[in-house]
Image (cartoon, rainbow, N blue to C red):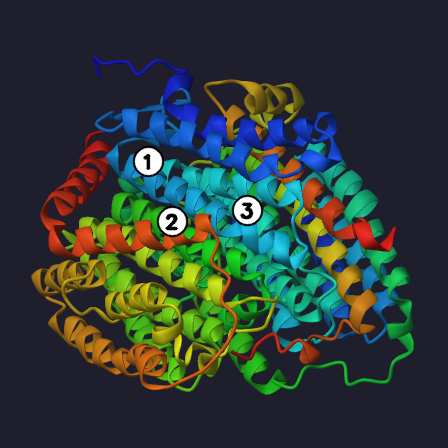
Amino acid sequence: MEFQVPSLNLLIVLPVLIVTGWGMLLMLAEFFIPEEKKSWAPWLTMLGLVLALIQTIGLWGYNGGTFTPKGGAPMVVVDNFATFLNIIFLLTGILTVLISIHYLRRTGLDRPEYYMLLLFSVSGMMLMGMANDLILVFLALELLSIPLYILSGFAWPRPDSEESAMKYFLLGAFSSSIFVFGIALTYGSTGTTSLPLVLERISDAGMLGLVATAMLIVGFAFKVAAAPFHMWTPDVYEGAPTTVTAFMSVGAKVGGFAAMLRVFVAALPQLGEAWVPAVAGVATLTLIVGNVVAIVQPNIKRMLAYSSIAHAGYIMIAVAASVNSPDGVSAALFYMLAYLFTNLGAFAVVIALEHKQGEGVMLDDYKGLGKRRPWLALAMAYFMLSLTGVPPTGGFSGKFYVFRAAIEADLLWLAIVGVITSVISGYYYLRVVYLMYMYDGEGEVVANRALVWTVGLTALATLVLGLLPGPWFDMARDAALQTVQMVAGG
Amino acid sequence: MPEVTIDWYVALSVILFSIGALGVLLRRNAIILFMSIEMMLNAANLAFVAFARHLGDLDGQVLVFFVITVAAAEVAVGLVLIVTIFRTKKSINIDEIHLMKG
Amino acid sequence: MVEQIVFILVSLFTLITAVVVVTNRNLFHAALALMASFLGVAGLYVLLDAGFLAAAQLLVYIGAISILIIFAIMLTRRLMHALESPFNSQWGLGAFTAVVAFAVMAGVIAQFWPVTPDSVTPLASRPEVSASILRGSVAELGRALVSSDAYVIPFEIASVLLLAALIGAIVVAWPKAEDE
């Protein structure tokens, strides 16, 4: 190879360095800033995330890696795939900070550690998309998860929050040990953990490689909350503070898919015959379980938990399609971008209605919202339509690209399952709309300025992705192609 | 008697992993669950070391360090959660936490 | 011959203590069995020429992790005398899942079993490398962990991970402001 990637190019990992460094900075700043000025933490966090976002956007188009072992492939790669995902993660972080500020104050959870852990978790997510080595994927997964375990339990001593943290922790640790065993078997059968080298050698790995793949699928399926490994999701989403639920419903899920796409599409395409049916099966089960069980949930956080399970199913369709369709990865990326705005927007409305911790989260609390807060109700209705997949919304565009990729990849039946379950999902999403406009009700709504801004911005973004999906999908396409090329070439 | 080969170690590690998984799926006490998870990580480490020995390179051993680090981080977080939940509920049995139910 | 006997003894010790961990009703005994099982794994590391890892295993797993677990047991010790069924309510389903998973993996292992050094398996197909590479490798390991052309980035991430875990543990363990 003539072109030598410099062994250390810290500039390209600067966004991650900023985010982790900012977490530590926050920790130090806590000692120097007097107690009465504690409101600095969210804005300082936001500043760090915005700086990292600017850096990340500047890296669009860059394609390279750093930390290259002797004779190996770089451990960290920065390509458009990673950059696209990093933008998603940083936006998730920024929007989460916006919805957290007031919520944390009124629930008495306002401590600077919340934001530190949030930053560490975001840096773990960013590394998920950039990791080009299985051990780095594992460490990034843990860096993403460990702060989330704590954040789920942040409302201690409330029993539901503590239980949620415990449950998340035990099942998360269980799934990581399965995942790490999968890495051990991959290492044993190929002699490496570097993804490009795994790609070269996996076809000789035999049965051991297949078992390793199966264990990696289980590990990822837990993380993205796909059935039958979803059982932790509803309780954790319900018990965790709502802002944390919002954060993990997007961040942890997209993080899991980031690494899953990189590992399965870039390193294990030759085993596609084995893992595509498995992923397609998991997707089918996930779609059915998520959408059907969501119907009977009286609590909006639980309903959105099952809804997030169902959306993992739609992204899984794109993953299954990504070996045989050039647009599989880009459909997944676009879907996640649309899901980010829609889901965080919906959670922002949930937070506005949750005037006290754990109160105002039943579906009945949404009765009459259309009269009390017409704009908020309109936004919520729009988010619900987007989650269902009705045009013109980002959710519709996402589903359209996903199903098209599935059909291209000869997975027509999977696309049909997707369409049918989308129709089923209309029942529970539109019920929220029905409750908001067809009933009278009274309940407190706390919408401060940051929250209103979040709702407005996410609704606008969802609308843009719905009306003008083309340019954004082209971006996702740029992001997807280069992953495959880069690894195939290196 | 046949030589001790890599496969003996892999078989041992798979059995150890399965015992750990069995513990997670069958028991109801959070601390026992946690211990079983640690055992599964140990099984993975054993596999790494055995493969490293077999392949004659050090990478497997380096990876074990990272797994040990993660185990240490998990133990800190896990046990503090277990103790906290015990303070509130006076129980750490997962049936009351409905671990496997959706 | 000696190697086989030592391997069998050490692995039996590891497995039996592991079974004790998942079946014993007494938490404290289970924790002690876990320590023994960790010790067995350390012994296996020695057999695999990974002496330094064996030492790390003793220090971290037995010296730190097991002791922390015993701390947790003592802090929640009323439970030791509780009269609850040791198995959870879904043990039938759980047992089924675990047995099936084990059977699948055992089937895979059986693919390359019984093994003689020249049997064709994905693992045995690679040449054995002289053990001198692995012996006395502490310096190599140390260098690998901090070299920019080796594992420095996972190393740094692992340190951030530990920091995050520490902050998290302190946040949860620290009394809330209103309790002070």
Q: Is residue B33 above or below residue A459?
A: below
Identity of the residue drawn at 31% across and 49% down: A457
Q: Nearer the viewer, mark 3 or mark 2?
A: 2
Give the residue displayed 45% in from the left and 30% down from the top: A16
- What residue type is disc 3 on? Glu
**C-alpha separation, residue under disc 1 versus residue under disc 2:** 46 Å
User: What residue sits right under mark 3 in the picture?
Assistant: A142
> Which subunit holds the residue at mark 3?
A
Residue on which the image places disc 1 = A197
Badge 3 marks a residue whose secondary structure is helix
Secondary structure of the residue carrying numbered label 1: helix
Give whichever of A459, B79 is nearer the camera: A459
Question: Where does the image place residue A301, in percent across and percent down from the top left?
Answer: 48, 71
Real-space CA distance between mark 3 and mark 2, rounded to the nearest whole angstrom = 32 Å
Residue C73 appears left or right of A205: right
The mark that comes first in sequence, 1 or 2, is: 1
Residue at point 27% right, 39% down?
A81
Q: Are marks 3 and 2 on the same chain?
A: yes
From this viewpoint, is residue A65 visible? yes
Q: In the rendered structure, which disc, 3 or 1, sits on the residue that comes first in sequence?
A: 3
Give the Cα separation between the discs numbered 3 and 1.
23 Å
| Left or right relative to A335: residue A13 | right
Query: Mark 1 and mark 2, same subunit?
Result: yes
